[in-house]
Image (tube, rainbow, N blue to C red):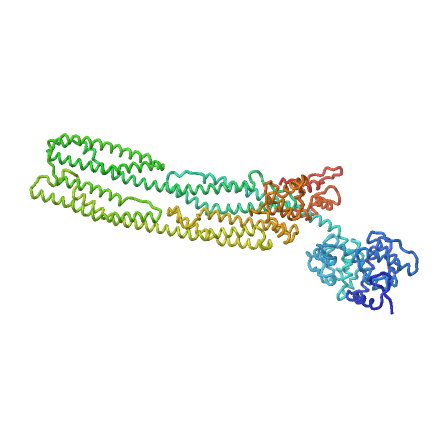
Amino acid sequence: MAQYANPNQFGAPMDENQYMEQEGEWEREGLLDPAWEKQQRKTFTAWVNSHLRKAGTQIENIEEDFRNGLKLMLLLEVISGETLPKPDRGKMRFHKIANVNKALDFIASKGVKLVSIGAEEIVDGNVKMTLGMIWTIILRFAIQDISVEEMTAKEGLLLWCQRKTAPYKNVNVQNFHLSWRDGLAFCALIHRHRPDLLDYSKLSKDNPLENLNLAFDIAEKYLDIPRMLDPEDLLNTEKPDERQIMTYVSCYYHAFQGAMQAEMAANRICKVLKVNQDNERLMEEYERLASDLLEWIRRTLPWLESRQSGNSLTAVQKKLEEYREYRRKHKPPRVEQKAKLETNFNTLQTKLRLSNRPAYMPTEGKLITDIQRAWNGLLGSEKTFEEWLLAELMRLERLEHLAKKFKHKADIHEAWTSGKEEMLSSQDYKNCKIFELKAMKKKHEAFESDLAAHQDRVEQIAAIAQELNALDYWDSAAVNTRCQKICDQWDRLGTLTQQRRTGMDEAEKVLERVDSLHLEFAKRAAPFNNWLDGTREDLVDMFIVHTLDEIQGLIDAHAQFKATLGEADKEFNAIIALIHECESFAKQYNVPGATINPYTNLTGKDVQSKWNEVKTLVPQRDQTLQDELKKQQNNEALRRQFAEKSNQVGPWIERQMDAVAAIGMGMQGSLEEQLTRLREYEEAVYQFKPHLEELERINQQIQESFVFENRYTQYTMETLRVGWEQLVTSVNRTINEVENQILTRDSKGITQEQLNEFRASFNHFDKSRTGRLNPEEFKNCLISLGYSVGQDKQGEIDFQRILTIVDPNASGYVQFDCFLDFMTRESTDVDTAEQVIDSFRILAADKPYILPEELRRELPPDQAEYCIQRMQAYTGMDAVQGALDYMSFSTALYGESDL
């Protein structure tokens, strides 16, 4: 039985079964295909010679020239850059086997597993074994080192080809056989890196032979890549050999490797500069929004703090309408602006931390705390302004009512006192007969009774005037003048009354007769008339009530009054009977002047007129009270309607706040699930907004109806507004926090399990559920996660250093995003100033400076100009005109931010 190479031991023979098994594997890989074998011999020979010519030699026959092992060892030294053991110079078979084994040992030392390739097969000129060995060397030294996004060598090389040829028409690289037959892929690779060597726009897919010859000729002449492929073979073979094309394409990869390094360096610089430009834009946007919001608050506060009402009910109602307009139209955009400002600030700080930049410190007076302080001041001013408006509305309404009441009572009193001073000043009693005097005296007594009855009315007028003064009524001067006039007149009436009585007493000795009938009428008619006057005044008296109980009390009092009308009717009939009796008596006894009552100015017609007026006013008063009852019932319905709606909205807002806070604790699913739920809550909040607007409409009706209290609910419109604003702010802030956590997780490469572990530890020590830890809680949290924090002085110094990282603003608390950034940043690969300097050095071809034309050639236009404008001139000894200092520029990117 024939012996073949052992797959596990170089130079040892293997039996025929093992050799047949190896041949089957090669046949599956295409190494035994006769058509491919010829092409591979040519390609592999060209590849070997491209390296051996560096040592001044080459091969003619691939299976013959490697048999003694000398050129094989030389090939490995050239492509590896290492020195192999000294070869045996003898010509015996065992010398050749020894040399081949040294080469195979060297290949194995590079981590290559040689299966079924033995030294004896190479020495014997086995073409299949030789081709397999050369392919193994190509894989290890020409293809294996190709790395694109951590893929395998073959996948990485294919991805590199796809990316480089993607912009080119008629090129679609999907494999290493059929995708290359028309030659356009080779031409695209050359044009991508050396557009000066060919004009791709003139190529056609219909001329594959011309395309292949053009690419191979240019590669051989300008790129030092030998012709490893035959265009006719590629076109005439149904499926070209994948290994041939991979070998040839790998030469393109290595030829353009320097350009790729420059491209990677340019990409790194672009990435760093884009981060800086984005951060600058966010900072400028924050400064603009903060300035605009603070200026709006500054302009709004004087209006909210103004307490000038002009003592006018119309002016206060106008101010109240202006305040409602402010709450509906002017403030909501500012609430959104404030939320956007906080979101931009948090996003900016997260991006700065993730890009290893210093934390952003806004200009003086524009910190988040400054804006929140100004906003809180605005909220406080709104609350006190609305409370003042409502109180002023009540006060002015009360003043208007009192002023009308004062005028009404004063008009009645002045009408009653009209002519009384002239009557009391008269001395007509000195010229009358005795019966006339007695009549005058009785009449005066009735007047005194009437005067005493009016004492309460004068006191009421004075009390109303005093209350108007206490409430700062706008026309208090006129009220005081009129009140003083009434009081002075009242004092004069009292004095004149006393003087007239004294005079009449002196004349009483000669005037004794009295008409008892007239006197009885006068005595009964005067109080009844006074009762009628008071009743008429009460029936037209204005009132103001705010509850059903108050109006019901007035209705009950009016019902009690109506119950007394029966007795009043009897008294009226008795008084009218006196008149009829007097007239009958005068007619019967023919008493002259008997129809004129000397004791009173009242007549039956006066009493009859006033009594009829009272009977007319009673049903009118009934109707007025019933109208007010309906109004209060409507107010009560408004209270219940507002209470029913607010008792739904208030708990809903509280539940949403609790749900958002629970999600903010970060333990309910993945961050994406949390973000999805938060978006759902955000949508639910805005879908729920019509309920709040409905409450605003009801609240406006309540205020317009002068309803100032509601016993059916604990919620007020102000508390619901504040709760709504807090809910909107909480949802936006929590969404922003979760998005920043996702950004941190993805940029740092941490897993969801790690993030959950960090969140669980953070929540465990966040006992108060405020979303932040104090220094002691933070230290305990670090220890629980296995972070070593020493208990000695050095450990305290290290811990203080950590605190400056996670709490750069020295707020005394550690937020979760800062905690998460700290736990991941030290083990994560981030851009550094040294890496950026190395990237610029590659673009500058190892010069300590870089020229503007180099920046414009390697970077996008906007970022090239960004660098040119900010780089300082290079001042070294070897400086040339226009040289720029990229080292100081790169260092400044990671230094103190002065953006």
- Residue 832 seen: yes
Residue that lies at the very extreme toward the bottom in this rendered image: 1
Residue 36 coordinates in the image, percent (x, y): 79, 65
| Front residue of 478 and 439 | 439
Left or right: 838 with respect to 700? right
Q: Is residue 624 visible?
A: no
> In screen coordinates, is 580 left or right of 647?
left
Q: Position of residue 45 (x, y in %)?
A: 83, 59
Closer to us: 368 or 196: 368
Image coords of residue 140 (percent x, y): 79, 57
Q: Quadrant of residue 277?
A: top right
**Most foreground residue, 567 or 596:** 567
Of 812 and 830, which appears nearest the observer?
812
Residue 480 placement: quadrant: top left
Q: Quadrant of residue 150?
A: bottom right
Query: Residue drawn at (60%, 54%), measured in percent from left and top?
Result: 670
Residue 708 percent across, percent down from the top left: 39, 46
The residue lying furthest to the left in this view is: 589
Instruction: Report the quarter where the N terminus lies.
Output: bottom right
Q: Quadrant of the C terminus?
A: top right
Seen at 73% across and 41% down, the residue is: 849
Mark count: 0
